[in-house]
Amino acid sequence: MPSTTLRRALVRSLRRPPWSPEAWRDTRFIAAGIPPALPVWLAVTESQLLFPVLAAVLLCTRPLTALQRGRLLALHGVEVPPPRPFTWRRAWLLGLTWRQVLHHLVVGPLLAAGALVVVYVWGAAAVLITLYGWIWLMPPGTTLRTDLDGLDVGLTAGGVLLLLAAPWAAALVARLEVWAAQLLLGPGRAEALERRVEEITESRAGLVDAVDAERRRIERDLHDGAQQRLTSLAMNLGLARRTLKDVLPPEAMQVIVAAHEEAQAAIDELRDLVRGLHPAVLEDRGLDAALSGIAARAPLPVRLDVDLTEPIAPTVEAVAYFTVSEALTNVAKHARADRVDLSVRTAGGRLRLVISDDGVGGADPSRGTGLTGLRKRTASVDGTLSVLSPLGGPTTITVELPCAL
């Protein structure tokens, strides 16, 4: 726990009244930590109990740790995530068990001693504040009443001070207990970083899936909405072009012909846009058929070799499809190649794409946005892209993607 957070918590505890719910919550929380520390205290005072208590703590480390986590959550609302389930041997090697044993044998009992002091302060404050009542109940002339005569005001004032100090002390011990539990009973720094990486990876995979689902939705909306309306408009204009050519003057027919051609051009552009968002063939017939369509539409010959023996996630299929499409576009624009070889295979849970051309080579990912965009696209699903392109060619682009996210 950062020192600034601990300092703020202590300042808040000083400002709150002794009867506040937070003060009683802290006291109840730290008082519940006293019973587990009793065996260790007994072992310290009785040397013959030292080894039995040590052996018991070593054997019961996991139950004791679970008990402490439950106390933190139930009485203080703090959740300490447990480390990953390890075998005993690996836990010892990683220091997980040693940290827990340190808490149960040393840190926990010391903090429990502080909790015992806090409980004593609360009790002393209650007794001293009510001292006037105790003196009044004593028979006149008793020795204790005579001894306390003249000290009652000072002792009562001391009780008030203890009452004001008790919440601060309880908050201090409670914050120290939380800090020690998070440090010694929770996952270590390396495991926390590993968990964070996994959370980021899962979040990125969810984001990629969400983007892919949104592309699919837009593709369906355009295909079923705007594209159908444009197709209907082009059909009506074509019908008018055929039926009215002998009725309307040439100037009017030129307008209809131009509108018909523009509608057809708009349909072609929209079809390309829809295919760029998410090709329907990829969802209907799979990656093999979709890549065959890309190869057939390519402006240069493409020799395709596909061997897909493992299931592939739809998001990964989309990334592979657009990667191949963009790579072939780059080859057609810059490589001056006569042909392209495209190999697509799955093995060991990985999808491997190899795109080779016989062009002039010299492709440099750092000098253009095309290969950089391909690398970012593959990285979005935790894939890799490598380029081998010496001057004079040939150029080989190798992409590896996970079959499942």
Image (cartoon, helix red, strand yellow):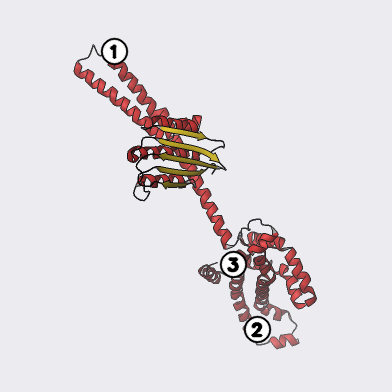
Secondary element at tag 3: helix
Residue 18 found in image quarter: bottom right
Q: Residue at x 72, y 60 (%)?
A: 63
For residue 243, the mark is 1
In the shown orientation, is residue 139 left or right of residue 119?
Answer: right
- Examine the rendering and report whether any part of residue 66 can be seen: no
Q: Looking at the rendering, in which quadrant would you find the N terminus?
A: bottom right
Q: Residues within 10 Å of mark 3 (few under 14, many from 20)?
A: some
Give the residue at mark 2. 152
How far apart in space, not on screen, are marks 2 and 3 (Cα)?
40 Å
Location of residue 83 with respect to 342 vertically, above or below: below
| Name of the residue lying farthest toward the top | 246
How far apart in space, not on screen, are marks 3 and 1 (Cα)?
86 Å
- Examine the rendering and report whether any part of residue 92 can be seen: yes
Secondary element at tag 1: helix
Location of residue 131 with respect to 62 vertically, above or below: below
Q: Residue at x 62, y 84 (%)?
A: 154
Front position in the image: 302 or 151: 302
Amino acid type, label 2: Asp
From the image, state whether disc 1 or disc 2 is nearer to you: 1
- Please tell me which of labels 2 and 3 falls first in the chain: 2
Give the residue at mark 3. 179
From the image, state whether disc 3 or disc 1 is nearer to you: 1
How far apart in space, not on screen, are marks 1 and 2 (Cα)?
116 Å
Residue 100 in picture, x, y percent from top left: 66, 65
Asked if the residues shown at circle 2 and circle 3 are in contact, with their CB atoms under 8 angstroms apart, the answer is: no
In the shown orientation, is residue 98 left or right of residue 326?
Answer: right
Residue 342 in picture, x, y percent from top left: 45, 36
